[in-house]
Amino acid sequence: MSDPVQQPRPRTALLAALVCVGVGLRLVALLSDRCLWIDEAMLALNLVDRTPGQLFGKLDYNQGAPVGFLLAAKAGISAFGPGAWAMRLVPFLASVAGLVGFAFVARRLLPAGASLLAVGLFAVSPHLVSYAAECKQYASDAAIAVGLFAAALGLLEGKGGWRWAGLAAAGAAAVWFSHPSVFVLGGIGTGLLVSALVERDRPRFLAAVGTVAAWLVSFAACYFLCLKQLGGNKYLTDYWAGHFMSLPPKGLGDLAWLVDHWVAFFTTPGGFGGALVPLGGFAAVLSLVGLREFARTRGAVAVALVVPAALVLLASGLQKYPIGGRLMLFMTPLAVLLVARGAWAVFDGLSEKNAFAARALLVLLVASPLWASFEFLKQPPRSEQLAPVLEQVRSEFRPGDRVFVYYGAVPAFTFYTRERPFPAEGVTLGSEHRDDPAAYRGELAGLRGRVWYVVSHRHGTEEAEALAVLDARAPREREVKRTGAAAYLYELK
């Protein structure tokens, strides 16, 4: 087995080619001309309506994002305007940097073949690709996790010197740009402290303590300035209610919850749950094999990789951080390292007995997320094309017309009509009444005249129920439909 640092040139070229594939997929996602969907629109309204100083305060629309990310995104739209691609520029650049950084980390930590596998998996991971083109912080979270590991590599390998100051500065900055970076730092700090204790290296232990102290001071400042108000947001706590762990677990049901969320992570956002061949459970098992391999050869790295998951579980049990979907994207780089290392160990063990089966395993492991990425690019999972619907409505809008906006469409409607608003007296913004269907009917009952019913980000059957109410009052005169959005014209008496 070759030293992962001294890889032959063909492998280095293949590594670069895989990075280029990953950049290409992310670029296609960025340039897909997809409108901002509801979550992006809510954050975008905060970005365009606030000064940089106001971004330190509580955000509108129950949004939460690291202030460093917000300031970077604000700088991007100040330079290039509030278009969708400019809104998504910071996550895209962060994702590309994360991909390059991941190739560096994988090359240092893994055997040559495993590093190629890891970079391939990271490059085509569907959720890393899709969130690279979204005006949210999740792609940046993953990139910062990679950056922190890159900054810590030398120290985790037993080196020292100037690296301590570099890691202290990187961690102190990271907490302002990524909320979950604290979990990654917790893993890295634990790995460094444990290795120093095991080796009984007092200077190294004190250096690790000083580095962690710098992170804690920075995090404390960030918490009291920005994060404290976010932790008390009842709407967000209720929204993620099903993703908080019971602490302590009270029975088999709670243990089943742990297993379910563990496998679910490898499916989404881990990227191994593609429709071609769902491999979430298989990838979860491979990660355990990979953890064992790291523990045998790189104990400090193994600790740094596994402790963030333990800290997330603790935070979830304390009702501080939900374990679900996009909020866990920052763990994907760590998971990919573990899965690739485990898969390569299985490949090595299987090759002599059945080379075809060994190769088929690796092909399947890469093909599933690659297929899912192609599917995502062909039909983005969060596509709400409201802007072209509004343009069509605007072209057919007559004096005296009214627009009723379904509540799920309000943020995107507000964003896309900032510069060219419909007559204020003719616009009615709907409200959310999920527990009171009669309230929806009450909103519609007051509409009269020529009315455009505009909808996107539908919840359940609410659109169908609203249309049934309107259809009972008058024939539907016009429909304008795009992916994830629509407008319906009625003449109501």
Image: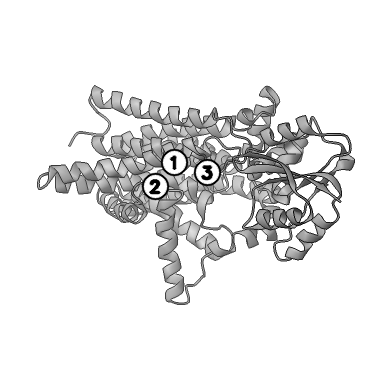
Q: Position of residue 307 (x, y in %)?
A: 42, 55
- Return the residue nearer the eye: 412 or 89: 412
- What label does residue 274 carry, if any? 2
> Separation of disc 3 and disc 2 at Cα?
13 Å
On the rendered structure, is 5 left or right of 252?
left
Q: Position of residue 339 (x, y in %)?
A: 32, 48
Circle 1: element type: helix
At label 3, counting other C-alpha atoms closer than 10 Å, the crowd grade (few under 14, some 14-19, many 20 or more) is few
Please give the residue where the numbered disc 3 appears in the rendered image.
381
Residue at 42%, 75% (x, y): give it.
252
Circle 2: element type: loop
Up the image or down, 480 lies above or below 407; here it is above
On the rendered structure, is 204 left or right of 404?
left
Q: Quadrant of the N terminus?
A: top left
> Separation of disc 3 and disc 1 at Cα?
10 Å
At label 2, counting other C-alpha atoms closer than 10 Å, the crowd grade (few under 14, some 14-19, many 20 or more) is many
Q: Position of residue 205 (x, y in %)?
A: 42, 49
Question: First in sequence: mark 3 or mark 1?
Answer: 1
Q: Are marks 2 and 1 in contact (CB under 8 Å)?
A: yes
Circle 3: element type: loop
Q: Are marks 3 and 1 in contact (CB under 8 Å)?
A: no
Please give the residue where the numbered disc 1 appears in the rendered image.
126
Q: Quadrant of residue 198?
A: bottom left
Residue 73 visible in the shown view: yes
